[in-house]
Image (cartoon, rainbow, N blue to C red):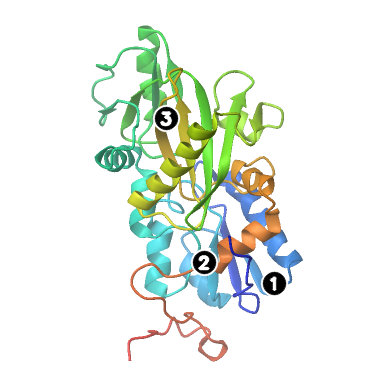
């Protein structure tokens, strides 16, 4: 795997963080960690930008050349911010508009994975404010159709608990996804620029890797490398890379799986902008293969690009500041 080149070291880097999603607090930590790492590696023009309705104006005001996207959840991870950056001609990290939108929508993700013969648990969509009944056998996992960090997710083992779980999922999304629960182990595969870094097993203290467990020290142990048979470990890495490829992901995504007692892999979801906090899995996996946090951040930034067509020059130059983005590459 290539070493970081520091392509953007002399440019003004905007680190997007915060934003309006339910994952705002996690993103604030990720963004601060990313900005600190870049500054430690000699990047002088690093700006932290808390994303709001004035994002375009903030990017113009600070004359940002390239964006490191440290947002999580809706707006920042679902293609909205990516589309704005494409229009403004500002290269950015992570996946493009289409892949971001696909991966934020868990139903569309599962349809693409299934079409490409990547196993995923059986599921049912409960749309709108309608039924709270499911045809799947219990236990099931109920989750919002489009949300991250296990927000609004419930494991339902008793029929009488199903309606309240669906209601909880619908607090953050119009549709609820009901998914067949797969007993066994939970693992995640870290990907960097199209290559699998490795596999971590997640062992929650209380048996469910929910929001509190993910971001509270001591609530889960992460075992790297995951203690799996060699063939299964390699298969998980191959499926992780393939899942990202068929969905069109770029940068440093993370792919979550369950492993059944029969040693079958089931893909759960693809995180296009995984956490970059001290407790986050992707930096842990990278560290496990000798890539420290600063190195990881710079490798991600090195691949910042516009995804809608050929890469174009940065949108801003000092003498154009305040005059709006130029139309680069359109003669």
Tag 2 or tag 3, which sits nearer the N-term? 3
Residue 265 is tagged as 3
Question: Label 1: few (<14), some or many (≥20) within 10 Å?
Answer: some
Q: Name which quarter of the figure residue 302 lies in.
A: bottom right
Tag 1 or tag 2, which sits nearer the N-term? 1
Q: Is residue 317 above or below residue 214?
A: below
Measure the C-alpha gap from mark 3 to mark 2: 30 Å
Residue 316 is tagged as none
Question: Label 3: few (<14), some or many (≥20) within 10 Å?
Answer: many
Contact (Cβ within 8 Å) of mark 3 with mark 1: no
Q: Position of residue 325 (x, y in %)?
A: 43, 81
Q: Position of residue 203 (x, y in %)?
A: 61, 25
Q: Nearer the viewer, mark 2 or mark 1?
A: 2
The residue that appears at 37% across and 85% down in the rendered structure is 329
Q: Position of residue 4 (x, y in %)?
A: 63, 67
Q: Name which quarter of the figure residue 107 lies in.
A: top left
The residue that appears at 52% across and 71% down in the rendered structure is 59
135 vs 22, left or right, is left
The residue that appears at 50% across and 88% down in the rendered structure is 320
Residue 303 is tagged as 2
User: Which residue does the numbered mark 1 point to in the structure image?
Assistant: 43
310 vs 33, left or right, is left
Q: Is residue 29 above or below residue 301?
A: above
Tag 1 or tag 3, which sits nearer the N-term? 1
84 vs 7, left or right, is left
Residue furthest to the front:
231
Q: Name which quarter of the figure residue 309 lies in.
A: bottom left
Disc 1 is placed on an element classified as: loop
Question: For this rendering, which residue is in front, 179 or 63?
Answer: 179
């Amino acid at each position: 795997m290539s070493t970081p080149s520091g392509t953007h070291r002399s440019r003004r880097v905007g680190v997007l963080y915060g934003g309006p999603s339910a994952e705002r607090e996690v993103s604030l930590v990720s963004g601060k960690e990313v900005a600190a790492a870049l500054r430690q590696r000699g990047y002088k023009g690093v700006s932290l930008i808390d994303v709001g309705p004035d994002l375009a104006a903030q990017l113009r005001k600070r004359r940002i050349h390239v964006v490191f996207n440290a947002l999580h959840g809706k707006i920042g991870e679902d293609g909205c911010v990516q589309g704005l950056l494409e229009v403004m001609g500002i290269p950015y990290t992570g996946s493009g508009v289409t892949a971001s939108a696909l991966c934020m929508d868990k139903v569309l993700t599962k349809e693409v994975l299934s079409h490409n013969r990547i196993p995923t648990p059986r599921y049912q969509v409960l749309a709108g404010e309608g039924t709270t009944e499911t045809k799947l056998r219990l236990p099931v996992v109920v989750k919002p159709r489009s949300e991250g960090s296990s927000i609004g997710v419930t494991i339902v083992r008793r029929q009488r608990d199903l309606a309240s779980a669906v209601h909880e999922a619908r607090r953050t999304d119009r549709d609820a996804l009901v998914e067949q629960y797969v007993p066994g182990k939970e693992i995640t595969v870290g990907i960097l620029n199209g290559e699998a870094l490795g596999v971590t097993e997640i062992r929650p203290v209380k048996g469910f890797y929910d929001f509190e467990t993910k971001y509270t020290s001591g609530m889960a142990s992460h075992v790297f490398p995951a203690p799996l048979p060699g063939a299964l470990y390699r298969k998980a890495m191959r499926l992780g890379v393939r899942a990202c490829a068929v969905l069109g992901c770029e940068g440093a995504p993370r792919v979550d799986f369950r492993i059944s007692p029969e040693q079958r892999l089931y893909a759960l979801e693809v995180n296009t902008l995984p956490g970059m906090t001290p407790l986050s899995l992707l930096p842990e996996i990278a560290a496990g293969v000798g890539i420290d946090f600063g190195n990881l951040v710079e490798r991600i930034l090195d691949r910042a690009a516009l995804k809608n067509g050929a890469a174009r020059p940065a949108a801003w130059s000092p003498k154009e500041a305040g005059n709006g983005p130029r139309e680069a590459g359109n003669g």
